[in-house]
Amino acid sequence: MRTAIYPGSFDPITNGHLDLVERAAKLFDRVVVAVAASEAKKPLFTLKERLEMVKDAIQTIPKAEADSFDGLLVDYVDRQGGHAIIRGLRAVSDFEFEFQLALMNRKLNERAETIFMMPKETYTFISSNIIKEIARLGGNIAPYVPDSIRLALAAKLKK
């Protein structure tokens, strides 16, 4: 069974993320959307909330499952029997950082192969941070996230 790990903070998951999950599921037998603790990023949602949002968002994608992890990604990949790490590239500006991460992951674990995927053009400008900012300012995020995420953001930002 060929397993891909798609790691991220997913704070929150967007339609751009889901596009990559759907496409990775066509290439692999199993895709684990791995929600990173990412406490250094000071996420808006807790790890538990982000994991639940991801589970809800991917429930209709065959071969996709959600999990959370803390620590080194390459160690998590080994524990899951992963064959590849999926990373999204929205723009050229993402490439340098992602390339450095891929090289470091390979140095830490030579079996950790990274596959870069680009989302559909429709989603290239979407990021979790932009979605949170639009939501904070009262803008319409419905075209960019699943309904459950839109509602979760509205509830979280009311507090």
Image: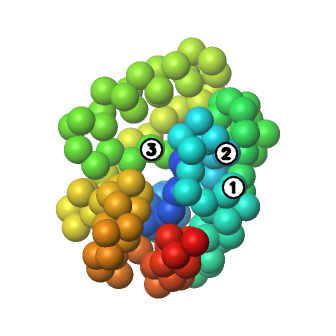
Pinpoint residue 96: horizontal percent, then vertical percent: 31, 27
Amino acid type, callout 3: Arg
Mark with earlier residue (3, 2) = 2
Give the residue number, with chain letter if any, for mark 1: 47
**Horizontal side, residue 106 vs residue 22: left or right:** right
Counting residues from the start of the chain, the first of labels 1 and 2 encountered is: 2
Residue at coordinates 64% horizontally, 41% vertically from top-left? 39
Circle 3: element type: strand
Task: Please say if the residues under marks 1 and 2 sit with CB atoms less than 8 Å apart.
Answer: yes
Disc marking residue 87: 3
Q: Is residue 55 left or right of residue 133?
A: right
* Lower position in the chain sequence, tag 3 or tag 1: 1
| Residue name at image x 57 percent, y 72 percent | 159
Dot 2 corresponds to which residue?
Answer: 37
Identify which residue, 102 or 93, lies in the foreground: 93
Identify the amino acid type marked 1.
Leu
Question: Does residue 23 show up?
Answer: no
